[in-house]
């Protein structure tokens, strides 16, 4: 999170059917940008099990075929994992790795534009140090307690994670970061793990620590979801933008939209936010997107396809 994106408002919950979507439903061109985990997909102890709620998937399918309407998913996941878990319809744009990866596809233009930066030598050194550091926690704990601590991370096979005990370290390997998942873990274990994980930053100040819902991520690129959203806006020139997000990293996207007059920023869940609106959970998101799809369809059905 950048220094200027700290939460500035604490809106009460608004029922999703009470939110005014008029600016979006009537816009000449709309961008519907959506976080995945905790927004479209309920949070899971095992992040490999995250799936979109069927109602949201249906609403996104409906929105994605409307004229002058672009849907984008904006996630901390890498683009490959995001595509696999979200299974988005053709034409949906993807931002992964908190903005470091941007994939623009379209139903009318088959070529997909993909921005996926290289990992520099220095960044690779940091990733190697992160892996060694995380692994040292597992070894320390095993030696100290005499009990076996199983590792859910498989250093060779990427983000493949196994489900298991409450002292299992789950590490998601992404092109530019490692994410340590602590959801569902024993509390003491999770807190020791977190303290250990972030200590690597003392040795490598270039590593960015990203704290999220029961995750600690160590990233070697500095891109934010705000950067990703800016790329989407530059590519699509929408006249109105919706952004929905539930996590700390989404605050950068909310901050980005404060410069746009025709935008609607909605926080999902209870955490502090700078977004002016707040709804409860992925079920409320599904309701909102369903209504948006129906109302925009009625308004733009006559327009030519983008
Ligand atoms: Mg999220």
Image (tube, helix red, strand yellow):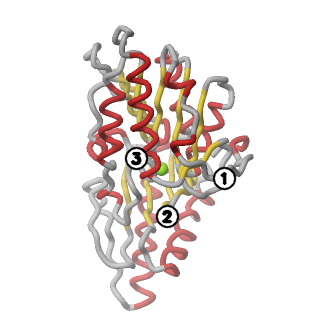
Measured along the vertical axis of the image, is residue 282 above or below residue 113?
A: below
In percent of width and height, residue 113 lies at: 35, 21
Which corner quadrant holds the C terminus? top left
Q: CA distance from mark 2 to mark 3?
A: 17 Å
Q: Residue at coordinates 29% horizontally, 36% vertically from top-left? A: 88
Indicate which disc, 2 or 3, sits on the residue closer to the N terminus: 3
Q: Position of residue 83 (x, y in %)?
A: 30, 40
Q: CA distance from mark 1 to mark 2?
A: 23 Å
Q: Is residue 102 visible?
A: yes
Which residue corresponds to mark 3? 40
Q: Residue at x 49, y 60 (%)?
A: 215
Question: Residue 303: which quarter of the image?
Answer: top left
Q: x and y percent of residue 38 in the render?
A: 45, 53
Residue furthest toward the bottom?
146
Q: Classify mark 3: residues with Cα within 10 Å, few (<14), some (14-19) or many (20+).
A: many
Q: Position of residue 95 (x, y in %)?
A: 43, 34
- State the residue position of label 2: 214
Q: Nearer the viewer, residue 273 or 232?
A: 273
Q: Residue at the location (39% across, 30% down)? A: 294
Is 185 situated above or below 264?
below
Q: Residues within 10 Å of mark 2 (few under 14, many from 20)?
A: some
* Mark 1, residue position: 12
At x 34%, y 12%, the residue is 305
Q: Of the residues under marks 1 and 2, which one precedes in the sequence?
A: 1
């Amino acid at each position: 999170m950048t220094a200027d994106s700290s939460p500035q408002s604490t809106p009460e919950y608004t029922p999703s059917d009470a939110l005014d979507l008029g600016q979006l439903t009537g816009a000449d061109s709309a961008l519907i940008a959506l976080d995945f985990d905790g927004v479209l997909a309920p949070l899971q102890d095992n992040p490999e099990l995250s799936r979109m709620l069927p109602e949201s998937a249906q609403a996104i399918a409906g929105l994605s075929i409307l004229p002058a309407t672009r849907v984008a998913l904006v996630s901390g996941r890498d683009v490959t994992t995001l595509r696999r878990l979200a299974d988005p319809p053709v034409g949906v744009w993807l931002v992964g790795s908190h903005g470091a990866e941007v994939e623009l596809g379209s139903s009318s233009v088959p070529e997909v534009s993909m921005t996926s930066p290289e990992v520099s030598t220095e960044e690779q050194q940091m990733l190697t140090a992160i892996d060694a550091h995380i692994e040292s926690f597992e070894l320390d704990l095993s030696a100290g307690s005499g009990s076996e601590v199983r590792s859910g991370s498989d250093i060779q096979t990427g983000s493949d994670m196994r489900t298991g005990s409450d002292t299992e370290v789950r590490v998601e390997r992404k092109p530019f970061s490692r994410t340590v998942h602590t959801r569902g873990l024993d509390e003491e274990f999770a807190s020791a793990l977190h303290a250990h994980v972030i200590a690597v930053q003392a040795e490598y100040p270039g590593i960015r620590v990203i704290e999220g819902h029961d995750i600690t991520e160590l990233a070697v690129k500095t891109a934010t979801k705000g950067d990703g959203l800016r790329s989407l806006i530059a590519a699509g020139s929408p006249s109105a933008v919706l952004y929905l997000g539930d996590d700390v990293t989404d605050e950068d996207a909310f901050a980005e939209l404060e410069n746009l007059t025709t935008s609607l920023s909605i926080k999902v869940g209870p955490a502090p936010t700078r977004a002016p609106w707040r709804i409860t959970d992925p079920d409320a998101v599904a309701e909102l997107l369903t209504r948006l799809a129906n109302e925009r369809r009625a308004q733009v059905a006559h327009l030519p396809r983008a």
